[in-house]
Amino acid sequence: MNLYGVRAIYNFEMARMRRTLMQSVASPVISTSLYFVVFGSAIGSRMGDIDNISYGAYIIPGLVMLSLLMQSISNASFGIYMPKFSGTIYELLSAPVSYLEVVLGYVGAAATKSVILGVIILLTAKLFVDYDVLHPFWMFAFLVLTSITFSLFGFIIGIWADGFEKLQIVPLMIVTPLVFLGGTFYSIEMLPEIWQTISLFNPVVYLISGFRWAFYGVSDVHVGISVGMTLLFLTACMVAVWWIFKTGYRLRS
């Protein structure tokens, strides 16, 4: 494996984060902090407990996942789209690096940014809401697994997109509604039975449920199912990336 090539791509993407700290880190942290203030402190103080957990603490895993999914997709999609837009994708394709090394560089950097952001948001949440983490290992495992999975998904979107507007279509029109309908601000057990069944077709439900279990030991679905569904989506993304590089789909257009 060409580790030098992987490191070069990875370092280039991480340098982009350092150049755009306000956009990459400060903006999502501030927006998520506003959620903590409004929903956690203001509204949460007038809400009852859910599963014996204060409302402000209950929504923390969902809000972290909301930022994590959006930033993972955004970082990875912009990372691979910019070489296509500028034409430097041809230098990348002709370089002595395999598709696996390209993916490791771009997706690894995007996932690293998301994990850093997730940790910062968790630390920031302590300023507004008191919470404990019951299973720290599983919390970090879900954080990393989700970051890698949705960075891969963002990588696919970046290759598929043929314009800047398409980079925003999936995150804004598909991912955001799925997150809000996936139990970010409530337990799906609070829904009518038919809507509980419909919610189980939402993949984000499993991510938030598993992440919340790592914090408080409560979940809407069994944690094993959450891990399995996340791994299934990760596998599907890996297969899609393999097919893209095998066929050259939109790599040169």
Image (cartoon, rainbow, N blue to C red):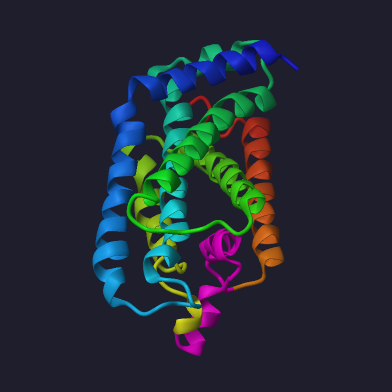
Residue 16 drawn at (x, y percent): 40, 21
Q: Residue at x 31, y 35 (%)?
A: 26
Residue 251 drawn at (x, y percent): 53, 28
Q: What kind of secondary structure does the magenta stretch mostly adopt? A: helix
Residue 244 drawn at (x, y percent): 62, 36
Q: Is residue 86 left or right of residue 9?
A: left
Q: Is residue 208 magenta?
A: yes
Q: Magenta residues, as a range?
A: 191-220
Q: Is residue 137 left or right of residue 75?
A: right
Query: For residue 147, which quarter of the picture?
Result: top right
Question: In which quadrant will I find the N terminus?
Answer: top right
User: Does 106 sit above or below residue 57?
Assistant: above
Of the pair 126 and 78, the residue shown nearer to us: 126
User: Does 160 sit above or below residue 225?
Assistant: above
Q: Residue at x 33, y 27 (%)?
A: 21
Of the pair 185 and 133, the residue shown nearer to us: 133
Q: Residue at x 45, y 77 (%)?
A: 50
Of the pair 9 and 15, the residue shown nearer to us: 15
Q: Residue furthest bottom?
A: 193
Q: Residue at x 46, y 72 (%)?
A: 53
Residue 225 drawn at (x, y percent): 69, 66
